[in-house]
Image (cartoon, rainbow, N blue to C red):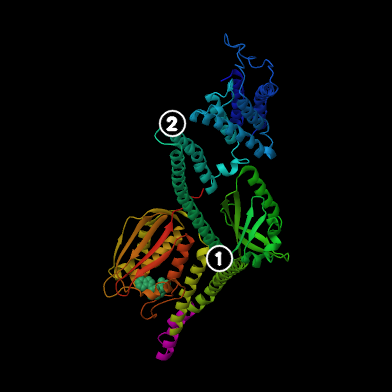
Amino acid sequence: MKPNTAVSIMLESAAVFSIATFGESKSAYKWAKFLAAPAMVIVILTLVEHVLNVDMGIDWAIFSPPAGAKGAPLPGRMSPITAAGLAAAGSSLLLSDIRRLALFSQILALITLALGLLASTGYLYQVPSLYRMRADVGVAIHTAISMFVLAIAILFSRPTMGLMIGFSSNTATGVMARRMLPAAIVIPLLIGWLQLMGQREGYYGAEFGVSLLVLTNIAIFAMLIGWNTSILHRLDQRSSETANALRASESYKAAILDTAVDAIITIDTKGTIESFNPAAQKMFGYAPTEVIGRNVRILMPQPYRDEHDRYIAQYLETGIEKIIGIGREVIGLRKDGSQFPMDLAVSEVSLGHGVAFAGIVRDITERKRSEESLVRQAEELTRSNIELERFAYVASHDLQEPVRTVMSFSQLLEKRLGNTLEPQSKEFLDFITDGVIRMHHLINDLLAYSRVNSQGAAFISTNCTELVSKILKNLQASIESQHAQIEVEPLPTILADSTQLGQLFQNLLANALKFHGPQPPEIRIGVKEIADGWLFHIKDNGIGIAKEYHDRIFVIFQRLHTIEEYGGTGIGLAICKKIVERHGGRIWVDSSVGSGSTFYFSIPRRERQK
Ligand code: ADP
């Protein structure tokens, strides 16, 4: 290799390296030109020397000739083939930053490739005329190979341009080209070489050699094409399967979008509407053609518009999507300017080229309306309950006095006239006295009932064991007369309105004593600690309650027996329920006829108020 050839090849290789390594940046191209330019000067001057047949003294400008070389005919001059090849490569590199000329620049590189291949073939087949135009200047073998490699490097340094687009693509075309091209170069070269060798060694004559060459080429290429065809066929099949799947998924999606009850609207990251399904059309009153391509702001009134713009701006800036996945209640704006409440859920859809957002919108006008009417009804109910309670309180309180008067005077009358009255009048007087006593109890109980909420005391620390034993003392007479057995498990100290809690135990215990069957009452009071407080129970062996009455007995004035069977006003359990509810708990019964009853009530644990 001549010194100038070596220098030029190195300069041009460095130029390719710059483009291939540092990408298609401006500075990479600048370096490439900077390196290719001196090589171009050398090769063009050499060509001028050859054409004009002059010695410009550049052949030994870089290195001194070896002793005795001077004077020999052109010993240091680059071959014209090399000079032409390197000139084509250099021009290709100098033009490489002009996109428009990408194809032209690659054709120049192909000239270098062809000249390199030509000279290499000359060496392989031992045909000097292919690498030596004149007897005294030839292309060295490594120069020929270097040119070939340099040209390939130039082509591959910009794989996405010109000729290389198809070659480097991932499509069937690219796969085919990448497989066939190397084979098309290497196989004929090798087979030709083998044929020539055999012929030169005298194994066969020229005719047989050519026939062998042609047939082997046909066989190998037919095989290669067959192999590639099956690969391409598979690729084709896969791509048609993908296309089918895509079509199926498209129609599936279209079916969902078209029949969805909810409006589904997709927007890009700037808020531009990309799709608008029929439900959206119905909900907002716009045809898809009227809104697609416009900003989604048109579907919302202020202040949601600005809020939405802020979300989008924030997303574009930081990539944080504040609204994703959250169902929010917002207001929608119809084409006619009317507004409606809607539920909005937004999800991110990842597309090949980025993301989009799908908004699923539900018109909640009806829901809102019924929610509002429910709230209104609840408010009315609370108000009427309070009024009723107040009325019950006032009525029972004011009735107490006249009833007491009637009661005491009827008792007085009975005492004075008792013995003098004829039997029927006495019976009438007894009815009056009984009735008025009963009315007195009723009014007292009603007063107690209406006082649970309005006149309850503060919750204080209450020792339930002590409380229950006090109640049992109150009920002593009834316990003894009925020979009742009462067992009390250890009970906790809790925060409660102790008077009301006492009333609760008293009512439940009195009932357990009252509603007994033929056996003497056996009553057990116990408690269990639960997650949020205490669950008390009072179990008896009395007459029991049929399942259908389990709820009814807690309603005011609801009784299951006549006064003759069991006395009472039917308010006791209603008061119990009110007391338990005031403490935040629940009361219920577990019972069946003939097998006793167990009343349960829970009292949630609460922090002591400071
Ligand atoms: P009263 O005892 O004044 O009738 P309550 O409200 O205390 O009213 O009870 C309502 C009804 O529930 C009673 O009439 C009775 O039928 C039934 N009941 C209450 N406690 C028991 C019990 N321990 N065993 C059986 N029945 C009961």
Q: Are marks 1 and 2 in contact (CB under 8 Å)?
A: no
Q: Nearer the viewer, residue 312 or 587?
A: 312
Query: In x, y percent, where is residue 476?
Result: 33, 65
Q: Residue at x 40, y 54 (%)?
A: 531
Instruction: Tell which residue pokes out farthest to the top in this image.
Output: 67
Callout 2 crowding tier (Cα within 10 Å): few <14, some 14–19, many ≥20: few
- Tag shown at residue 255: 1
Label 1 element class? helix
**Amino acid type at mark 2:** Arg
Q: Which residues are magenta?
A: 408-430
- Tag shown at residue 27: none
**Can you say whether 363 is above or below 111 in the image?**
below
Callout 1 crowding tier (Cα within 10 Å): few <14, some 14–19, many ≥20: few
Label 2 element class? helix
The residue that label 2 is drawn on is 200
**Amino acid type at mark 1:** Ala
